[in-house]
Amino acid sequence: MNKHARQLKIREILQQKNVNNQHDLLQLLRDSGMRVAQATLSRDCAELGIIRSRTNGNFKMLLPDDDADKIIKGLVGIEVLAINANETTIIIMTLPGRAHGVGSWLDQLKSPLILGTIAGDDTVLVIPSSVLNISALKSYIHKNLSKN
């Protein structure tokens, strides 16, 4: 089955059932006759922007919507402690263990200002597409972190 059809099936399952985690989703896909590797499912979930949210003490996988985007933006904003720049790069300091999530969020923005990110435990290195864009990129990051 091709990627598009697989991702449509994932959307269908998540809209119709409460799915707690990728393991459960993988089993539901298999029950529907689809053979999918865990790594492929993980990539599909990332591409579809699927998040895991806690509701009533239980986790549930959710498709993105405007509210989810606002929630994620708010969480990322809380996790960022400082944004610093020099002539070539931007460094974002985060809460311990949160750099990967912040780096992933930046990557999902797909800004032409960002060449790439590298995340450690509490630091994200943001590499601009051009050193001439440092100031614009820093402003762009600040703007996207604001809670407006």
Image (spheres, rainbow, N blue to C red):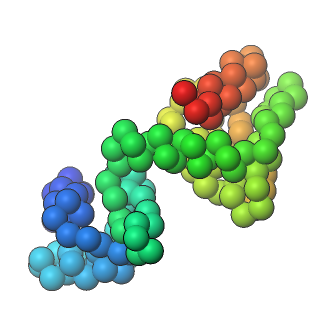
Residue drawn at x 86%, y 25% as measured from the top left? 87
Residue drawn at x 69%, y 22% as measured from the top left? 139
**Residue 52: image x %, image y %?**
43, 64
**Residue 27: image x %, image y %?**
25, 82
Residue drawn at x 34%, y 59% as measured from the top left? 62
Is residue 5 toward the left or the right of residue 86 in the image?
left
The extreme right residue here reads 86
Residue drawn at x 41%, y 47% as measured from the top left? 68
Most foreground residue, 10 or 116: 10
**Residue 128: image x %, image y %?**
69, 30
In the depicted structure, whether residue 22 falls above or below residue 140: below
For residue 7, what is the image quadrant?
bottom left
In the picture, the quarter occupied by the C terminus is: top right
Most foreground residue, 107 or 52: 52
In the depicted structure, whether residue 64 falls above or below residue 140: below
Most foreground residue, 103 or 132: 103
- Residue 70 appears in the figure: yes
Is residue 16 toward the left or the right of residue 49 in the image?
left
**Residue 35: image x %, image y %?**
22, 78
- Residue 103 appears in the figure: no
